[in-house]
Amino acid sequence: MEKGQELYNKAKTLIPGGTQLLSKRPEMFLPERWPSYYKKAKGCEIWDLDGKKYIDMSYMGIGSCILGYADRDINDAVKRCIDSGSMNTLNVPEEVELAELLINLHPWAEMTRYVRTGGEAMSVAVRIARAYSRKDKVLFCGYHGWHDWYLSANLMSKKSLNGHLLPGLNPLGVPDNLSGLTIPFEYNDTEGFLRIFEKHKNETGAIVLETIRNYEPEKEFLFAVRKSAFKKNIPLIADEITSGFRLTSGGAHLIYGLEPDIAVFAKGISNGFPMAAVIGKKKVMQSAQDSFISSTYWTEKIGPVAAIATIKKIIYNDVPKHLIETGRKVKKIWKSTAGKFRLDIQISGIDPLGHFSFICKEPLVYKTLFTQKMLEQGFLAATAFYSSYSHKSHHIKSYAAACNKAFAFIKRVSESGNPKRFLKGPVCHSGFKRLN
C-alpha cells in the first residue's frame, strides 16, 4: 500500500470523515488509489508522500491557488510578514490597505470586514444583513457553505439543497427551530424567484446568490432579484467566493451589471493563505457594530498581506485573461476528444472553472475510470478543471495527450458491456456520504 493511502486509513480512525473538507476526500476522486497527501507543491505540480510527481489538472487547492502553488511573490511577502511578527496586541495596517484596494476595485462598496474562510464570511455577511434589516428569513440560490443558516434549508426537506452543488447534506445538529428561515430558489428561474419573494418578502432579511457558477446569468433574472431587493430594502449578498477574480480583477458582478449591497470573497484572493473579505455599502455594513462579530485570528497579518500581494499580481499580469483562455483550451480538449471516440459528455461551468459529465447509465463509473487512467499517466484529474496562472501551454499539451488515452480506454471498456470490472477500486462518491 502506498504511504498516502496508508496514512488516510489511519486518519479515518482519528478524524471523523477522514479529512477537514468534503471536497478533498479521496473517495470523491479514486477510492483506495488516490495519493491523499502531499509532501511538496510548486506551480501546478504536486509530489505525494512516496515522492511521485503529478500535474494538477483538477481543483488547484479547491480553487484557492489562483496563481499556482507556492508562488514566489506571494511566499516572499508572507515570509517577510512572518519575520516581522504575524500577530500581536496591535492591529495590522494592511487591513486598511486591503480595504482601500477592494473598494477601489468595487466603487459601489464603502466598507469591509475580514474573516479567514469562505463559509464563515458568508455567515458574517448574513448576520450583517439580518442586523440591518431586523428580519430573519434568507432567500438564496447556490452553494454557500456548511453553517447553520444555510444547512437549515434541509430541515424542511432533505432535498432542498440538492440542486445547489452538493446533494445529500444532512442537517443533523442544526436546531429544528431554524426550519423555514432559509428558502431556496433556482438560478435563472425568474418566475420561480418572484413567486417565492412575493410569499416571503415581508419577513425576508437577506437575499443571497452566487453571481455565476455553471451557467451565464440571464439579465432578466439578475434584474428581478436586484429590483425586488431594492423595493423592500432587503440587503442583496453576492457570493463571489468561487467566481471572484477569475473573470475580471474583482467580482464577477462587475461584468454583469449587478450591484449588490454586500459581496463576499475568499479562495482566489490570497493564493492558498487563509483569508476572506466581506465588502459592502456603508449603510448596511455599519450594522456589524450593532451585533457581536469578533474573533482573535481575524486580526493576524498573513491573510491581508497574502491578499494584497495576490490581488496586485492578478491585476498586473491580467491573470483572469490567462484563466479564461486556459479554461477554454481544456474545454475544447474535452469536446474534441470525446467526439473523436463518440462518447457522450456535457460540458458546463465558466471558462476558468470548467466541468464535464458523462451522459450514460453509470456516469460515476466512467468518472472513476477517467480519474484512474489519468492518475496512471501522472495527472491529478477529475471531471473538472480549475485553471491557474501556473498552467502553461506545455501542461495543456501533455494533458491533451493523456485525455486522448483516457477517453480511448473508456471507449474500449464501454464496449465490453461491463466497464465496472476495469476499476481497480470502488466507484467514487457523489455528494455527501458518511464514512464508516
Image (cartoon, rainbow, N blue to C red):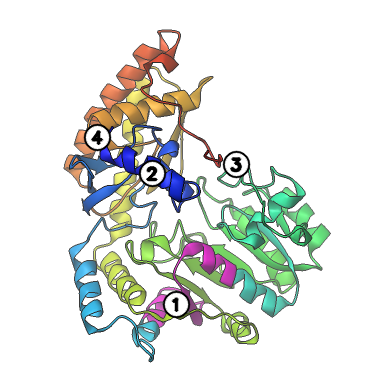
Q: Amino acid at mark 4?
A: Tyr
Tell me if mark 3 has few (under 14), some (14-19) or many (20+) residues whose alpha carbon lies within 10 angstroms of its own.
Answer: some
- State the mark number for residue 10: 2
Q: Amino acid at mark 2?
A: Lys
Of pointers 1 and 3, the one earlier in the residue sequence: 3
Find the distance from the CA under tag 3 to the CA under tag 2. Answer: 27 Å
Name the one closer to the observer, 404 or 83. 83
Closer to the camera, 38 or 65? 38
Image disc number at residue 298? 1
Q: CA distance from mark 3 to mark 4?
A: 30 Å
Q: Nearer the viewer, mark 3 or mark 2?
A: 2
How many angstroms separate mark 1 from mark 3 (CA)? 31 Å
Q: Which residues are magenta?
A: 98-124
Q: For mark 2, give the secondary structure.
A: helix
The quadrant the N terminus occupies is top left
Q: Which residue is disc 3 drawn over?
A: 167
Q: Are marks 3 and 2 in contact (CB under 8 Å)?
A: no
Which residue is the site of mark 4? 399
The numbered mark, 3 or 4, whose residue comes first in the sequence reads 3
